[in-house]
Protein backbone atom coordinates (compact mmCIF):
# COMPACT_ATOMS: atom_id res chain seq x y z
CA UNK A 1 0.00 0.00 0.00
CA UNK A 2 1.41 3.33 -0.98
CA UNK A 3 1.59 6.31 1.31
CA UNK A 4 -0.97 9.05 0.78
CA UNK A 5 -0.72 12.67 1.84
CA UNK A 6 -4.19 13.11 3.18
CA UNK A 7 -5.65 16.41 2.13
CA UNK A 8 -2.85 17.31 -0.23
CA UNK A 9 -3.32 18.11 -3.90
CA UNK A 10 -3.03 15.45 -6.54
CA UNK A 11 0.35 16.86 -7.58
CA UNK A 12 1.75 15.42 -4.36
CA UNK A 13 3.56 12.18 -5.29
CA UNK A 14 2.24 10.58 -2.13
CA UNK A 15 -1.38 11.24 -3.08
CA UNK A 16 -3.37 7.97 -3.17
CA UNK A 17 -3.72 6.30 -6.52
CA UNK A 18 -6.12 3.59 -5.56
CA UNK A 19 -8.10 3.46 -8.76
CA UNK A 20 -7.01 1.19 -11.62
CA UNK A 21 -5.11 2.74 -14.52
CA UNK A 22 -7.23 3.82 -17.43
CA UNK A 23 -7.50 1.38 -20.30
CA UNK A 24 -7.00 2.37 -23.93
CA UNK A 25 -9.35 4.98 -25.26
CA UNK A 26 -12.07 3.60 -27.53
CA UNK A 27 -12.81 5.45 -30.74
CA UNK A 28 -16.25 7.01 -31.11
CA UNK A 29 -18.33 5.69 -33.99
CA UNK A 30 -19.11 8.24 -36.64
CA UNK A 31 -22.64 9.54 -36.14
CA UNK A 32 -24.92 11.72 -38.28
CA UNK A 33 -23.99 15.36 -38.07
CA UNK A 34 -27.38 16.44 -36.83
CA UNK A 35 -27.49 14.04 -33.88
CA UNK A 36 -24.87 14.50 -31.09
CA UNK A 37 -23.74 11.19 -29.63
CA UNK A 38 -22.55 10.44 -26.11
CA UNK A 39 -18.91 9.81 -25.38
CA UNK A 40 -18.35 6.15 -24.54
CA UNK A 41 -16.64 5.25 -21.28
CA UNK A 42 -13.25 3.62 -21.24
CA UNK A 43 -13.10 -0.02 -20.35
CA UNK A 44 -11.59 -1.37 -17.17
CA UNK A 45 -10.71 -4.88 -16.15
CA UNK A 46 -12.70 -6.29 -13.26
CA UNK A 47 -10.67 -5.60 -10.09
CA UNK A 48 -9.07 -8.30 -8.06
CA UNK A 49 -9.42 -8.61 -4.32
CA UNK A 50 -6.34 -6.41 -3.94
CA UNK A 51 -7.65 -3.62 -6.19
CA UNK A 52 -10.32 -1.03 -6.08
CA UNK A 53 -13.09 -1.63 -8.58
CA UNK A 54 -13.06 1.12 -11.18
CA UNK A 55 -14.98 2.66 -13.98
CA UNK A 56 -14.13 4.96 -16.81
CA UNK A 57 -15.33 8.39 -17.52
CA UNK A 58 -17.86 8.63 -20.24
CA UNK A 59 -15.15 9.84 -22.50
CA UNK A 60 -11.53 9.48 -21.50
CA UNK A 61 -11.50 10.10 -17.78
CA UNK A 62 -11.55 7.54 -15.02
CA UNK A 63 -13.68 8.21 -12.00
CA UNK A 64 -15.00 6.91 -8.75
CA UNK A 65 -13.22 4.55 -6.44
CA UNK A 66 -12.90 3.20 -2.96
CA UNK A 67 -9.52 2.71 -1.37
CA UNK A 68 -7.88 -0.64 -1.69
CA UNK A 69 -7.11 -2.53 1.44
CA UNK A 70 -9.09 -4.69 3.79
CA UNK A 71 -12.45 -4.10 2.17
CA UNK A 72 -14.18 -7.09 0.49
CA UNK A 73 -13.28 -7.89 -3.08
CA UNK A 74 -15.42 -5.78 -5.41
CA UNK A 75 -17.80 -7.35 -7.85
CA UNK A 76 -17.15 -7.18 -11.56
CA UNK A 77 -18.37 -3.72 -12.37
CA UNK A 78 -16.77 -0.67 -13.90
CA UNK A 79 -17.85 2.91 -12.92
CA UNK A 80 -17.84 5.87 -15.34
CA UNK A 81 -18.52 9.64 -15.41
CA UNK A 82 -21.08 10.91 -17.86
CA UNK A 83 -20.81 13.72 -20.36
CA UNK A 84 -21.54 13.11 -24.00
CA UNK A 85 -19.58 13.92 -27.11
CA UNK A 86 -21.02 15.25 -30.32
CA UNK A 87 -20.07 13.45 -33.55
CA UNK A 88 -17.09 14.59 -35.55
CA UNK A 89 -16.95 14.67 -39.36
CA UNK A 90 -16.51 11.36 -41.22
CA UNK A 91 -12.99 9.93 -41.14
CA UNK A 92 -12.23 12.06 -38.10
CA UNK A 93 -13.35 9.86 -35.27
CA UNK A 94 -12.36 11.17 -31.86
CA UNK A 95 -12.00 9.91 -28.36
CA UNK A 96 -14.56 11.46 -26.06
CA UNK A 97 -12.64 13.43 -23.43
CA UNK A 98 -15.41 14.37 -21.08
CA UNK A 99 -17.41 12.85 -18.21
CA UNK A 100 -15.18 12.42 -15.40
CA UNK A 101 -14.02 9.62 -13.16
CA UNK A 102 -13.37 6.09 -12.15
CA UNK A 103 -15.08 4.68 -9.08
CA UNK A 104 -13.65 1.95 -6.96
CA UNK A 105 -16.32 0.54 -4.73
CA UNK A 106 -17.17 -2.95 -3.58
CA UNK A 107 -20.19 -3.08 -5.90
CA UNK A 108 -21.00 -2.93 -9.56
CA UNK A 109 -21.06 0.81 -10.11
CA UNK A 110 -22.34 3.12 -12.82
CA UNK A 111 -21.87 6.82 -13.34
CA UNK A 112 -23.54 9.07 -10.89
CA UNK A 113 -27.17 10.00 -11.11
CA UNK A 114 -28.47 13.46 -10.56
CA UNK A 115 -31.84 15.01 -10.24
CA UNK A 116 -33.29 18.42 -10.32
CA UNK A 117 -36.50 19.84 -9.05
CA UNK A 118 -38.11 23.07 -8.01
CA UNK A 119 -40.18 23.62 -4.92
CA UNK A 120 -43.86 22.88 -5.12
CA UNK A 121 -46.53 23.56 -2.53
CA UNK A 122 -48.01 20.11 -2.91
CA UNK A 123 -44.63 18.46 -2.48
CA UNK A 124 -43.88 20.49 0.63
CA UNK A 125 -47.20 19.55 2.12
CA UNK A 126 -46.53 15.93 1.26
CA UNK A 127 -43.21 15.97 3.07
CA UNK A 128 -44.74 17.63 6.12
CA UNK A 129 -47.49 15.06 6.34
CA UNK A 130 -45.04 12.22 5.80
CA UNK A 131 -43.33 12.94 9.10
CA UNK A 132 -46.03 10.87 10.77
CA UNK A 133 -46.01 7.56 8.90
CA UNK A 134 -49.31 5.81 8.35
CA UNK A 135 -49.77 2.10 8.96
CA UNK A 136 -51.87 -0.06 6.69
CA UNK A 137 -52.53 -3.77 7.06
CA UNK A 138 -51.65 -6.28 4.38
CA UNK A 139 -52.53 -9.79 5.47
CA UNK A 140 -50.70 -10.26 8.75
CA UNK A 141 -48.05 -7.60 8.04
CA UNK A 142 -48.00 -3.87 8.73
CA UNK A 143 -46.51 -1.58 6.12
CA UNK A 144 -45.41 1.98 6.80
CA UNK A 145 -46.32 4.35 3.99
CA UNK A 146 -45.69 8.01 3.20
CA UNK A 147 -47.04 10.46 0.66
CA UNK A 148 -45.41 10.29 -2.78
CA UNK A 149 -43.86 13.60 -4.01
CA UNK A 150 -45.71 15.35 -6.82
CA UNK A 151 -42.95 14.64 -9.33
CA UNK A 152 -44.89 16.12 -12.27
CA UNK A 153 -45.11 19.52 -10.57
CA UNK A 154 -41.53 19.33 -9.30
CA UNK A 155 -40.21 18.44 -12.76
CA UNK A 156 -42.14 21.25 -14.44
CA UNK A 157 -40.84 23.84 -11.98
CA UNK A 158 -37.27 22.59 -11.80
CA UNK A 159 -36.81 22.23 -15.55
CA UNK A 160 -36.91 26.01 -15.89
CA UNK A 161 -33.56 26.17 -14.05
CA UNK A 162 -31.86 23.22 -15.75
CA UNK A 163 -29.67 23.63 -18.82
CA UNK A 164 -28.13 21.44 -21.50
CA UNK A 165 -24.47 22.36 -21.90
CA UNK A 166 -22.70 22.34 -25.27
CA UNK A 167 -18.91 22.47 -25.31
CA UNK A 168 -17.07 23.04 -28.56
CA UNK A 169 -14.11 24.52 -30.33
CA UNK A 170 -14.06 26.80 -33.35
CA UNK A 171 -17.82 26.43 -33.83
CA UNK A 172 -17.81 22.60 -33.69
CA UNK A 173 -19.69 21.02 -30.74
CA UNK A 174 -17.57 18.40 -29.01
CA UNK A 175 -19.21 17.51 -25.67
CA UNK A 176 -22.68 17.65 -24.16
CA UNK A 177 -23.56 17.77 -20.49
CA UNK A 178 -25.96 19.30 -17.99
CA UNK A 179 -26.05 22.05 -15.38
CA UNK A 180 -28.40 24.15 -13.27
CA UNK A 181 -28.83 27.78 -12.30
CA UNK A 182 -27.39 28.80 -8.92
CA UNK A 183 -27.60 32.08 -6.99
CA UNK A 184 -24.43 33.18 -5.23
CA UNK A 185 -24.91 33.36 -1.46
CA UNK A 186 -23.81 37.00 -1.14
CA UNK A 187 -25.49 38.51 -4.20
CA UNK A 188 -28.39 38.18 -6.61
CA UNK A 189 -26.09 37.19 -9.45
CA UNK A 190 -27.01 33.99 -11.28
CA UNK A 191 -24.47 31.36 -12.30
CA UNK A 192 -24.52 27.79 -13.60
CA UNK A 193 -23.05 24.88 -11.64
CA UNK A 194 -21.83 21.85 -13.59
CA UNK A 195 -19.00 19.29 -13.55
CA UNK A 196 -15.39 20.13 -14.25
CA UNK A 197 -15.09 17.22 -16.66
CA UNK A 198 -18.02 18.54 -18.72
CA UNK A 199 -16.44 21.93 -19.51
CA UNK A 200 -12.69 21.27 -19.18
CA UNK A 201 -12.17 20.88 -22.94
CA UNK A 202 -13.71 24.33 -23.46
CA UNK A 203 -11.23 26.02 -21.14
CA UNK A 204 -8.62 26.75 -23.79
CA UNK A 205 -8.03 28.90 -26.83
CA UNK A 206 -10.94 28.59 -29.23
CA UNK A 207 -13.11 26.83 -26.65
CA UNK A 208 -16.80 27.68 -26.37
CA UNK A 209 -19.38 26.74 -23.74
CA UNK A 210 -23.10 27.40 -24.31
CA UNK A 211 -26.15 26.77 -22.13
CA UNK A 212 -29.50 25.82 -23.64
CA UNK A 213 -32.66 26.36 -21.57
CA UNK A 214 -35.93 24.47 -21.79
CA UNK A 215 -37.46 27.48 -23.55
CA UNK A 216 -34.93 27.03 -26.34
CA UNK A 217 -32.94 30.11 -25.33
CA UNK A 218 -29.24 29.53 -25.98
CA UNK A 219 -26.72 31.72 -24.17
CA UNK A 220 -22.96 31.99 -24.36
CA UNK A 221 -21.11 31.47 -21.08
CA UNK A 222 -17.65 31.97 -19.68
CA UNK A 223 -15.90 29.65 -17.24
CA UNK A 224 -15.67 31.47 -13.90
CA UNK A 225 -13.59 28.68 -12.38
CA UNK A 226 -13.27 24.93 -12.22
CA UNK A 227 -11.97 22.66 -9.50
CA UNK A 228 -10.72 19.28 -10.77
CA UNK A 229 -10.21 17.95 -7.23
CA UNK A 230 -13.96 18.05 -6.56
CA UNK A 231 -15.21 17.94 -10.19
CA UNK A 232 -17.13 21.21 -9.75
CA UNK A 233 -17.18 24.08 -12.26
CA UNK A 234 -19.06 27.38 -12.44
CA UNK A 235 -20.21 29.24 -15.56
CA UNK A 236 -21.29 32.87 -15.95
CA UNK A 237 -24.06 33.62 -18.46
CA UNK A 238 -23.41 36.58 -20.73
CA UNK A 239 -27.17 37.16 -20.95
CA UNK A 240 -29.78 35.74 -18.56
CA UNK A 241 -33.03 34.78 -20.30
CA UNK A 242 -36.17 36.42 -18.98
CA UNK A 243 -37.93 34.52 -16.22
CA UNK A 244 -34.95 32.34 -15.31
CA UNK A 245 -34.29 31.85 -11.61
CA UNK A 246 -32.03 29.72 -9.46
CA UNK A 247 -32.92 26.22 -8.36
CA UNK A 248 -33.63 26.17 -4.61
CA UNK A 249 -30.84 24.55 -2.59
CA UNK A 250 -31.62 21.78 -0.10
CA UNK A 251 -29.71 20.29 2.83
CA UNK A 252 -27.65 17.30 1.72
CA UNK A 253 -26.44 16.78 5.30
CA UNK A 254 -30.00 15.84 6.32
CA UNK A 255 -30.48 13.16 3.64
CA UNK A 256 -31.53 9.67 4.67
CA UNK A 257 -31.17 6.40 2.81
CA UNK A 258 -34.47 5.56 1.12
CA UNK A 259 -35.53 9.17 0.45
CA UNK A 260 -37.08 9.75 -2.99
CA UNK A 261 -35.03 11.78 -5.48
CA UNK A 262 -35.25 12.93 -9.08
CA UNK A 263 -32.45 13.37 -11.61
CA UNK A 264 -32.79 15.91 -14.40
CA UNK A 265 -30.47 16.56 -17.29
CA UNK A 266 -29.45 16.05 -20.88
CA UNK A 267 -28.65 12.32 -21.29
CA UNK A 268 -27.54 11.36 -24.80
CA UNK A 269 -28.45 14.88 -25.87
CA UNK A 270 -32.11 14.34 -24.93
CA UNK A 271 -32.81 17.54 -23.01
CA UNK A 272 -35.50 17.81 -20.30
CA UNK A 273 -35.14 14.17 -19.28
CA UNK A 274 -36.12 13.22 -15.72
CA UNK A 275 -35.76 9.95 -13.83
CA UNK A 276 -36.73 9.10 -10.27
CA UNK A 277 -35.40 6.76 -7.62
CA UNK A 278 -34.20 6.80 -4.05
CA UNK A 279 -31.06 7.59 -2.10
CA UNK A 280 -29.42 4.17 -2.18
CA UNK A 281 -26.47 4.99 0.09
CA UNK A 282 -24.65 7.90 1.68
CA UNK A 283 -20.96 8.61 2.35
CA UNK A 284 -19.89 6.46 -0.61
CA UNK A 285 -16.14 7.15 -1.04
CA UNK A 286 -15.27 7.76 -4.66
CA UNK A 287 -11.83 8.35 -6.18
CA UNK A 288 -11.79 9.51 -9.79
CA UNK A 289 -9.45 10.84 -12.43
CA UNK A 290 -10.45 14.27 -13.75
CA UNK A 291 -9.14 16.62 -16.45
CA UNK A 292 -6.86 19.11 -14.73
CA UNK A 293 -5.37 22.37 -15.88
CA UNK A 294 -2.36 23.22 -18.00
CA UNK A 295 0.13 22.33 -15.27
CA UNK A 296 -1.75 19.16 -14.27
CA UNK A 297 -3.28 17.28 -17.21
CA UNK A 298 -4.98 14.81 -14.87
CA UNK A 299 -6.03 15.22 -11.25
CA UNK A 300 -7.29 12.76 -8.62
CA UNK A 301 -10.83 13.64 -7.54
CA UNK A 302 -12.20 12.34 -4.25
CA UNK A 303 -15.90 12.58 -3.38
CA UNK A 304 -17.99 11.55 -0.40
CA UNK A 305 -20.85 10.77 -2.75
CA UNK A 306 -24.59 10.24 -2.65
CA UNK A 307 -25.50 6.95 -4.34
CA UNK A 308 -28.85 6.72 -6.16
CA UNK A 309 -30.72 4.29 -8.38
CA UNK A 310 -32.32 7.07 -10.43
CA UNK A 311 -31.25 6.28 -14.00
CA UNK A 312 -28.21 8.27 -15.12
CA UNK A 313 -26.73 8.12 -18.59
CA UNK A 314 -24.07 9.91 -20.66
CA UNK A 315 -24.86 13.62 -20.70
CA UNK A 316 -26.37 13.71 -17.20
CA UNK A 317 -23.08 14.95 -15.74
CA UNK A 318 -23.46 18.29 -13.99
CA UNK A 319 -27.24 18.10 -13.74
CA UNK A 320 -29.08 18.37 -10.42
CA UNK A 321 -30.33 15.64 -8.12
CA UNK A 322 -33.36 16.97 -6.23
CA UNK A 323 -35.38 15.78 -3.26
CA UNK A 324 -39.15 15.47 -2.81
CA UNK A 325 -39.39 19.17 -1.97
CA UNK A 326 -37.92 20.16 -5.34
CA UNK A 327 -34.60 21.30 -3.87
CA UNK A 328 -31.23 20.35 -5.31
CA UNK A 329 -29.28 18.10 -2.94
CA UNK A 330 -26.58 16.80 -5.30
CA UNK A 331 -24.73 17.29 -8.57
CA UNK A 332 -24.67 14.28 -10.93
CA UNK A 333 -21.13 13.23 -11.67
CA UNK A 334 -20.57 9.52 -12.33
CA UNK A 335 -22.12 6.04 -12.50
CA UNK A 336 -21.12 2.39 -12.63
CA UNK A 337 -21.19 0.11 -15.65
CA UNK A 338 -20.63 -3.59 -16.18
CA UNK A 339 -17.25 -4.67 -17.55
CA UNK A 340 -17.07 -4.74 -21.33
CA UNK A 341 -20.05 -2.47 -21.95
CA UNK A 342 -17.85 0.52 -22.71
CA UNK A 343 -15.99 -1.26 -25.50
CA UNK A 344 -19.20 -2.59 -27.03
CA UNK A 345 -20.86 0.82 -26.99
CA UNK A 346 -23.69 -0.50 -24.80
CA UNK A 347 -22.85 1.37 -21.59
CA UNK A 348 -25.84 2.84 -19.77
CA UNK A 349 -27.48 3.05 -16.39
CA UNK A 350 -27.53 -0.07 -14.24
CA UNK A 351 -29.07 1.71 -11.29
CA UNK A 352 -25.90 2.75 -9.48
CA UNK A 353 -25.17 6.44 -9.87
CA UNK A 354 -23.31 9.04 -7.80
CA UNK A 355 -23.73 12.71 -7.00
CA UNK A 356 -21.60 15.32 -5.27
CA UNK A 357 -23.47 16.48 -2.12
CA UNK A 358 -24.77 20.01 -2.67
CA UNK A 359 -23.19 21.26 0.57
CA UNK A 360 -19.76 20.49 -0.84
CA UNK A 361 -20.59 21.66 -4.36
CA UNK A 362 -21.89 25.07 -3.27
CA UNK A 363 -18.96 25.67 -0.89
CA UNK A 364 -16.57 25.08 -3.79
CA UNK A 365 -18.78 27.07 -6.21
CA UNK A 366 -18.88 30.09 -3.89
CA UNK A 367 -15.08 30.11 -3.68
CA UNK A 368 -14.77 29.87 -7.47
CA UNK A 369 -17.20 32.77 -7.89
CA UNK A 370 -15.35 34.91 -5.36
CA UNK A 371 -11.75 34.20 -6.38
CA UNK A 372 -11.63 31.77 -9.30
CA UNK A 373 -9.91 29.20 -7.08
CA UNK A 374 -10.98 26.76 -4.36
CA UNK A 375 -9.37 25.45 -1.20
CA UNK A 376 -10.14 22.13 0.45
CA UNK A 377 -10.33 20.93 4.02
CA UNK A 378 -7.39 18.78 5.14
CA UNK A 379 -6.02 16.92 8.16
CA UNK A 380 -2.30 16.94 7.44
CA UNK A 381 -1.40 13.24 7.67
CA UNK A 382 0.08 10.58 5.43
CA UNK A 383 -2.09 7.49 5.48
CA UNK A 384 -2.46 4.00 4.07
CA UNK A 385 -5.36 1.58 4.11
CA UNK A 386 -5.16 -1.05 6.82
CA UNK A 387 -7.16 -3.12 9.27
CA UNK A 388 -7.32 -3.40 13.04
CA UNK A 389 -9.20 -5.29 15.73
CA UNK A 390 -12.05 -3.32 17.30
CA UNK A 391 -14.04 -4.97 20.05
CA UNK A 392 -12.86 -8.36 18.85
CA UNK A 393 -13.86 -7.70 15.22
CA UNK A 394 -11.42 -6.92 12.40
CA UNK A 395 -12.38 -3.69 10.65
CA UNK A 396 -10.89 -1.52 7.91
CA UNK A 397 -8.97 1.59 8.89
CA UNK A 398 -6.85 4.48 7.68
CA UNK A 399 -3.40 4.00 9.21
CA UNK A 400 -1.46 7.17 10.10
CA UNK A 401 2.05 6.84 8.65
CA UNK A 402 3.15 10.39 9.41
CA UNK A 403 1.76 13.64 10.86
CA UNK A 404 2.72 17.05 9.47
CA UNK A 405 4.09 19.31 12.13
CA UNK A 406 1.66 22.11 13.07
CA UNK A 407 -1.16 20.58 11.01
CA UNK A 408 -4.75 20.13 12.27
CA UNK A 409 -3.94 16.46 12.93
CA UNK A 410 -0.86 17.39 14.93
CA UNK A 411 -2.76 19.96 16.98
CA UNK A 412 -5.58 17.48 17.56
CA UNK A 413 -3.25 14.81 18.93
CA UNK A 414 -3.03 12.22 16.14
CA UNK A 415 0.10 10.06 16.30
CA UNK A 416 1.97 7.89 13.86
CA UNK A 417 0.58 4.36 14.00
CA UNK A 418 -2.97 5.38 14.96
CA UNK A 419 -5.73 3.51 13.15
CA UNK A 420 -8.61 5.85 12.27
CA UNK A 421 -11.80 3.77 12.21
CA UNK A 422 -14.56 6.43 12.29
CA UNK A 423 -15.09 10.05 11.28
CA UNK A 424 -17.98 11.72 13.13
CA UNK A 425 -19.26 8.18 13.81
CA UNK A 426 -19.18 7.26 10.09
CA UNK A 427 -17.02 4.14 9.57
CA UNK A 428 -13.66 4.67 7.85
CA UNK A 429 -12.70 1.57 5.87
CA UNK A 430 -9.53 2.86 4.23
CA UNK A 431 -7.46 5.79 3.02
CA UNK A 432 -9.84 7.03 0.32
CA UNK A 433 -12.77 6.79 2.73
CA UNK A 434 -11.02 9.13 5.17
CA UNK A 435 -10.04 11.52 2.39
CA UNK A 436 -13.57 11.63 1.02
CA UNK A 437 -15.07 12.36 4.44
CA UNK A 438 -12.53 15.10 5.14
CA UNK A 439 -12.98 16.65 1.69
CA UNK A 440 -16.73 16.91 2.36
CA UNK A 441 -16.10 19.29 5.27
CA UNK A 442 -15.24 22.98 5.39
CA UNK A 443 -12.41 24.96 6.90
CA UNK A 444 -13.03 25.46 10.61
CA UNK A 445 -15.26 22.39 11.03
CA UNK A 446 -14.43 20.32 14.12
CA UNK A 447 -14.72 16.57 13.59
CA UNK A 448 -14.55 13.61 15.96
CA UNK A 449 -12.08 10.92 14.96
CA UNK A 450 -12.35 7.50 16.55
CA UNK A 451 -8.93 5.85 16.63
CA UNK A 452 -7.43 2.59 17.84
CA UNK A 453 -4.15 3.26 19.65
CA UNK A 454 -2.30 0.46 21.36
CA UNK A 455 -5.33 -1.77 20.97
CA UNK A 456 -7.64 0.66 22.76
CA UNK A 457 -10.32 2.89 21.17
CA UNK A 458 -10.40 6.60 21.90
CA UNK A 459 -12.00 9.74 20.43
CA UNK A 460 -10.14 12.92 19.57
CA UNK A 461 -11.44 16.20 18.14
CA UNK A 462 -9.69 17.87 15.22
CA UNK A 463 -10.47 21.31 13.76
CA UNK A 464 -9.88 21.23 10.01
CA UNK A 465 -7.91 23.80 8.05
CA UNK A 466 -7.99 24.43 4.31
CA UNK A 467 -5.42 24.72 1.57
Image (cartoon, helix red, strand yellow):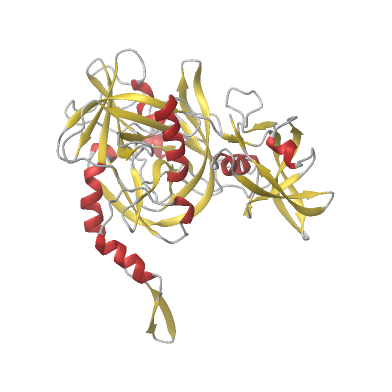
Taking the view exactly as shown, the residue that stands out farthest to the right is 454
Q: Residue 275: x percent and y percent?
A: 30, 52
Q: Horizontally, is 253 left or right of 233 in the view?
A: right
Q: Which residue lies furthest to the bottom in this view?
A: 140
- Residue 55 visible in this rendered orientation of the protein: yes
Q: In which quarter of the image is residue 186?
A: top left
User: Which residue sits at x=63%, y=46%?
Assistant: 446
Tell which of 77 and 157 is nearer to you: 157
271 vs 120: above or below: above
Q: In this view, does 436 lie to the left or right of 39?
A: right
Q: With 319 as the anchor, is 413 left or right in this view?
A: right
Q: Where, quadrant-wise, is the N terminus in this rendering?
A: top right
Report the number of discs. 0
Q: In which quarter of the image is the C terminus?
A: top right
The x and y percentages for residue 391 are 77, 60
Q: In which quarter of the image is residue 465?
A: top right
Q: Which residue occupies 40% across, 53% down? A: 309
Q: Which of 370 and 72 is in front in this view?
A: 370
> Where in the figure is residue 343, as x and y percent of width and height?
40, 34
Q: Residue reaching furthest top?
A: 205
Q: Where is residue 234 in the image (x, y as percent from the top left)?
A: 37, 31
Residue 357 appears anywhere in the view: no
Amino acid sequence: MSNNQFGSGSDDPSFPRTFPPAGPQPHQPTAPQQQPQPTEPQSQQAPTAQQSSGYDTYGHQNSYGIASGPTPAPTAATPQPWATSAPTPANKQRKGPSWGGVIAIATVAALLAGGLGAGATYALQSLQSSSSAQETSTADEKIKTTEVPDWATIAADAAKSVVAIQVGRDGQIGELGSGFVYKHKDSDDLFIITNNHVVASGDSAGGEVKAVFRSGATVATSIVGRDPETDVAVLKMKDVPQGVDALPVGNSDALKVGEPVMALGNPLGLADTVTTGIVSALNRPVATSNPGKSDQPEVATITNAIQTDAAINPGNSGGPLVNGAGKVIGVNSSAAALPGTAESGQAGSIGIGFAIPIAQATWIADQLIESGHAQHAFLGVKITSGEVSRSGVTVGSAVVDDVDSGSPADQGGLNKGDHIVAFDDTPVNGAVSLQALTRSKKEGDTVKLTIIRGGHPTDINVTLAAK
